[in-house]
Amino acid sequence: MHDVKPPISLILIWIIGGLLGLYASFSLIMERIHVAEFADAVASCDLNPILSCKSVMLSSQAKLFGFPNPIIGLAAFFAPIMVAAAVLAGAKFVTWFWHIFMTGLAGGFVFVIWLMTQTLYSINALCLYCMVAWFGMIPMFWSTLIWLLKEDIIQAPIRFTNFIDSSAKWSWVYSVATELVIVVLILTHFADRLSILFSFAR
């Protein structure tokens, strides 16, 4: 067992990030059912030709494993909420559990980055609900990784100790920096269509 308890700030990040992801995943599933039932339907998150959930939902990237990605999201984003609830209830987990949990978050983070690049540079459209899921996953990844490194649950070379200790005090910076990079990439990619991006004409 590991006697170190995650700080309340990290527990809240798991809960909030998980809830954001669940909300986004559930909303996308509902929209996908609506579009499947009515081929000419306009999704509630279709605000303009760029902010178009329908364009993303109907792409091959939206069903990477043969079924809609949000189904994965429903299961994946439920996990951090359950971990948070267990910790609040007094549960303590062995090292291998934290390694598996971090592996799942890392997989989610990589999936988010892949989806972001696909929506921008292949589909050429953005999905608002997808972005809600992205911005829920990113803080969970960075905050958990830095906490696990600080507590030596994930071991790093000793020469990085001071850097990790400093990072633990500013873990939010990594999340904000990642999210700002995504925003900059979006604005840069659609630089010649910003008027469309910020319009609400479907």
Image (cartoon, helix red, strand yellow):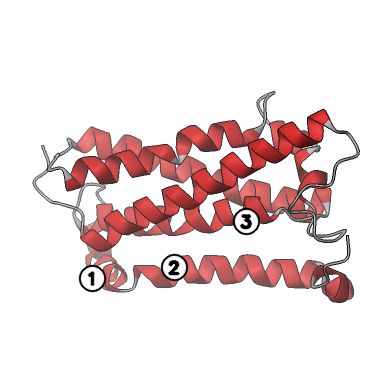
Indicate the position of residue 119 as horizontal and vertical percent values.
75, 51
Indicate the position of residue 153 as horizontal and vertical percent values.
21, 47
The nearer-to-camera label among 1 and 2 is 2
Residue type at numbered disc 2: Tyr
Tag 1 near tag 2, CB within 8 Å? no
| The disc label shown at residue 162, or none | 1
Mark positioned earlier in the residue sequence (2 or 3): 3
| The disc label shown at residue 131, or none | 3
Between the C-alphas of marks 1 and 2, the distance is: 17 Å
Helix, strand or loop at label 1? It is: helix
Return the residue at label 2.
174
At a point 66% along the width and 37% down the height, the residue shown is 30
Q: Nearer the viewer, residue 88 or 123?
A: 88
Helix, strand or loop at label 3? It is: helix
- Above or below residue 143? Residue 100 is above
Quarter of the picture holding the N terminus: top left
The nearer-to-camera label among 2 and 3 is 3
At a point 78% along the width and 34% down the height, the residue shown is 60
**Numbered-mark total:** 3
Mark positioned earlier in the residue sequence (1 or 2): 1
Between the C-alphas of marks 2 and 3, the distance is: 17 Å
At a point 88% along the width and 34% down the height, the residue shown is 39
* Mark 1 neighbour density, 10 Å: few (under 14) some (14–19) many (20 or more): few
Q: Is residue 97 left or right of residue 113?
A: left
- Above or below residue 145? Residue 57 is above
Residue type at numbered disc 3: Met
* Mark 2 neighbour density, 10 Å: few (under 14) some (14–19) many (20 or more): some
